[in-house]
Amino acid sequence: MSPTEPSNTPEGNSKLVLSARNLAKAFGSNEVLRGIDIDVRRGQVVALIGPSGSGKTTVLRSLNGLEVPDAGTVTFGDADAGTVRGSGAGLTLDFAGTVGKREIAALRDRSAMVFQHYNLFPHMTVLKNIIEGPLQVQKRPRAEVVAEAERLLARVGLADKRDAYPFELSGGQQQRVGIVRALALKPQLLLFDEPTSALDPELVGEVLGVIKELADEGWTMVIVTHELAFARQVADEVIFMDGGVVVERGPAAEVLRGPREERTKQFVKRLQHEV
Amino acid sequence: MTFNWDLVWSSFGPIIGGAVTGTIPLTLASFALGLALALLVALLRLSPNRLLSAVARFYISVIRGTPLLVQLFVIFYGLPSIGVKLEPWPSAIIAFSLNVGGYAAEVIRAAILSVPKGQWEAGHTIGMSRPQTLVRIILPQAARVSVPPLSNTFISLVKDTSLASLILVTELFRNAQQIAAFSQEFMILYLESALVYWVICLVLSTGQSALERRLDRYVAH
């Protein structure tokens, strides 16, 4: 097996949630993605690592339609029972053709995103931030949605912040609300874009703790991160990207402890020195 | 000079009456319509469609580049010559709304642009369409930013409505003018009307502060 092709590990038998093939994207003359393949299976945690500008965030954003790739396909499998977003049949988008608003909306409907800078709605209380999507977009009953939001807030230790505004929270608390906002949508797939990069070092742990719990619970996730120790702990698969291509991929322990490719070795070594 | 106190007291009635039945409703109606127009123009201006954006830019340019008095006269005295005859009140409301529409459009456009791009993205990722994100996420935040400049527009409008006296709208200043012409007490009547405009604007400034405090409740101080 080549180190740059999607792995065929034992969980290869479990259901594919997402399969992206040959994603390509250029901003002007700058080619940020040059043929990326990713498979994510149910319950799997995939960590995307790589230097700044390697294209990892663009990959993540493409999976959610925040960026529209120039070419390639993204396929979501049939939805599991229990997910509200993207309920029903599978979905394939071929970006080589024209992709309309409706297709992008359908793509967005499968996943939920947690942002580096949280991007909470500053004019809404914590509770309103969380119930906005389920209530306004998914049209679920208010009582159910509020109860769910309160339960999730309690889980991340923020039950007492229900009526606070985002500015009243620390960065770590805001990011935990960001995670709850994503969970409340009941997505098939959770996407994290460097969820701890904007946090003060002492607040990183509380956010990583929540993400690790979600991984243990069996949520399917793709995480862009610089936290290699964390990636080793939670990720089933690590994908190392550089220059818009996948340089190496495999089980987290293998890629991070004994990388085969020279570029991966250098990157892992450099980050470990920084820590 | 002897000061005519009787006239001072007796003229307050008609002047305040003119404010209540003329100046204030004219201001409120024109501002409400003007603001709706401004939002539309701001959105056209922000549209990726170049033609729509150019139309909006042209409109803003004409409104800001010509005197309000001229706009008022074109509508009331000019339009009848091409067969469009409007009464004083509708003429005034149309002229002032168009004027507010031009000025406030730029304020609203800047306020929309001041909301970080991440807010649009967050709206999209929870499944909202562009219009939904605009209405529920972006405009409430833009409102906070645009209250101080829009309050300026509003307060200016209160005073600008005095121009409507020149197209025969019975409002505060026209009542003052008529009493002045009759009594020949120009100083008293014009100072009185100045005072009433000033009091209205003071009240509005207080309202502006209260509104700003209310919209600032979700911002760190």
Image (spheres, coloured by chain):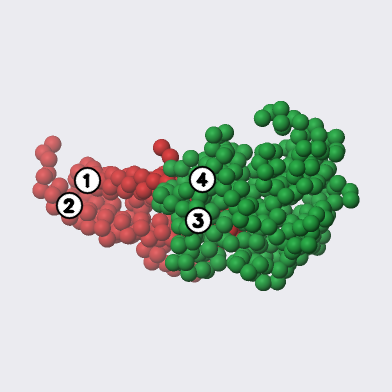
Which residue is at 61% across, 48% downward? Answer: A212
Q: Which mark is residue B192?
A: 1
What is the C-alpha distance between the residues marked 4 and 2?
A: 60 Å
Q: Which of disc 4 and disc 3 is earlier in sequence?
A: 3
Residue A265: x percent and y percent? 81, 34
Query: In what element is the residue under mark 1?
Result: helix
Above or below residue B136? Residue A56 is above
Which residue is at 58% across, 62% downward? Answer: A186
Give the side of residue A203 with respect to residue B186, left or right: right
Q: Nearer the viewer, residue B167 or A103?
A: A103
Q: Residues within 10 Å of mark 1 (few under 14, many from 20)?
A: many
Above or below residue A273? Residue B172 is below
Query: In what element is the residue under mark 2?
Result: helix
Q: Look at mark 2 in the image and give the residue it sits on.
A: B11
Q: Which of disc 1 and disc 2 is earlier in sequence?
A: 2
Q: Are marks 2 and 1 on the same chain?
A: yes
